[in-house]
Image: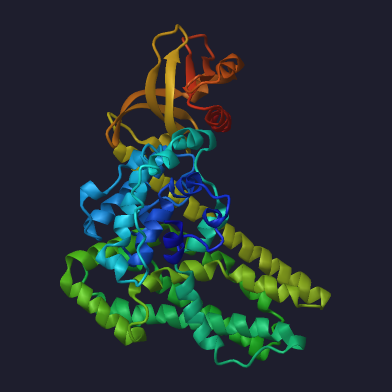
Amino acid sequence: CGQWLISCKVLPPNHRVTWDTAQVFDLAQTLRDGVLLCQLLNNLRSHSINLKEINLRPQMSQFLCLKNIRTFLSACCEIFGMKKSELFEAFDLFDVRDFGKVIETLSKLSRTPIALGTGIRPFPTEESVDDEDIYKGLPDLIDETGVEEDEELYDCVYGEDEGGEVYEDLMKDEAAQQPKCPENDIRSCCLAEIKQTEEKYTETLESIEKFFMVPLKRFLSASEFDTVFINIPDLVKIHRNLTQDINDSIVNKNDQNLYQIFINYKERLVIYGQYCSQVEIAISCLDNISKTKEDVKLKLEECSKRANNGKFTLRDLLVVPMQRVLKYHLLLQELVKHTTDPMEKANLKLALDAMKDLAQYVNEVKRDNETLREIRQFQLSIENLNHSLLQYGRPQGDGEIRITTLDKRARQDRHIFLFDLAVIVCKRRGDNYEMKEIIDLQKYKITNNPTTDKENKKWSYGFYLIHIQGENGLEVYCKTKDLKKKWLEQFQMAL
């Protein structure tokens, strides 16, 4: 199974599942948050799953891990034609209740027509009595270690941002025509790269406007049009001017005022905050239109052919502005590195700082949007919740705990969603949750209960939530010592 996942480019060739010391646990731990399973389907058939609909860093959230796994299972049925009876259940993987069933599902997936069409050899399910022994003890091991947090693994699969390959492809067309950079004049090459990539990027924006916006105007409603194209016309205007100013500086002014150009444009480029906050909605809207309106789908294909011989779709091109705005500080960083004149270097550092500020702002906007998406997902899954979760700040994590009041009523199984300002206490009902209580964290303090750690058994690791004004408090019990440590850290961050 591990080798098949490597062949599908989901795991890197040197991943620990290939080591001599590898155990089934390593594979279970790697797949447990559902992220790589969703990527697997996209590698077998592109756009099987919209990566924007899954959560790429769900480590402290059982809810988000399960949502990823269920997204994978739905796509196996809807796109790969698998029967429900061939699929494992979400908790079979998350709690590793039946990892044998997970392997069996992946084996059957490897034999679907779509998977076989890639030319990758399927893997067999080794059905033998001994298999049961391999999976024994996995739930306990998983409990002790929590969810995988292998940053390098995710970088291997995703790179830094969606759309990076399209951006590089668009930029290298221009670069390929240039002679190789001489060792003694790297600075000139840095300037040439700034100039040429800005020209190419501006052409890309103009291409979106000319070959997609104009022809599609009569095919889309005003609302759809504004949603899909966001503020592209404003970006076109800014970058036409920026291209002109950069060219003038490098060609006519020996780049003496280049630093000032970037400082001056910083405020204008802040409109990328709006673009980056809305591009996800734009792509979802475009996907929906393509699925429901055949005439628009055909028109989009025609537009792509006219724009770039069908090499890039509008969907591809819409992610390019997000890539470009995060490249300016990298381009200037390289230029600063190869600038020797002290005054020029100092001036360029001012420009570099301005573009770093811009990149930080854009990244914060993107993070805020990811957080808002998570909160919306929580909101939709919690029944009896009559007001917005947004009022409670950022989510800090969620998962299963056991809870009792300090007057020692019976422990209750609960799923909690921890926010900066409150804990939403729920009871799990299938894939959804029923809200039971909201704990206002501003009225509580947290205290460890070290005596519970000595029991050394599941669900015995506790801490107290004590009411500041002396009202009845709560005791929270965690499944393992490691989970207690994580929950204490998350609660302390919130409090």
Q: Nearer the viewer, residue 394 or 105?
A: 105
Percent across and percent down for residue 148 are: 51, 45
Examine the image and state in which quarter residue 166 appears: bottom left
Compared to residue 291, the image places residue 371 above or below, namely: above
Percent across and percent down for residue 58 are: 46, 45
Q: Residue furthest top?
A: 407
Q: Residue furthest front?
A: 129
From the image, which quarter does the C terminus lie in? Answer: top right
Q: How many marks overall?
A: 0
Q: Nearer the viewer, residue 274 or 460?
A: 460
Q: Is residue 430 visible?
A: yes
Q: Residue furthest right?
A: 342
Percent across and percent down for residue 337 are: 74, 73
The residue sitting at 49% across, 54% down in the picture is 365
In the rendered structure, the answer to whether residue 305 lies left or right of residue 319 reads left
In the rendered structure, the answer to whether residue 115 lies left or right of residue 447 reads left
Compared to residue 54, the image places residue 472 above or below, namely: above
Q: Nearer the viewer, residue 31 or 468?
A: 31
The residue sitting at 43% across, 46% down in the picture is 33
The residue sitting at 48% across, 62% down in the picture is 158
Colour scheme employed for the rendering of this structure: rainbow
Q: Is residue 376 visible?
A: no
Q: Nearer the viewer, residue 92 or 265?
A: 92
From the image, which quarter does the N terminus lie in? Answer: bottom left
The residue sitting at 40% across, 42% down in the picture is 130
Percent across and percent down for residue 464 are: 53, 17
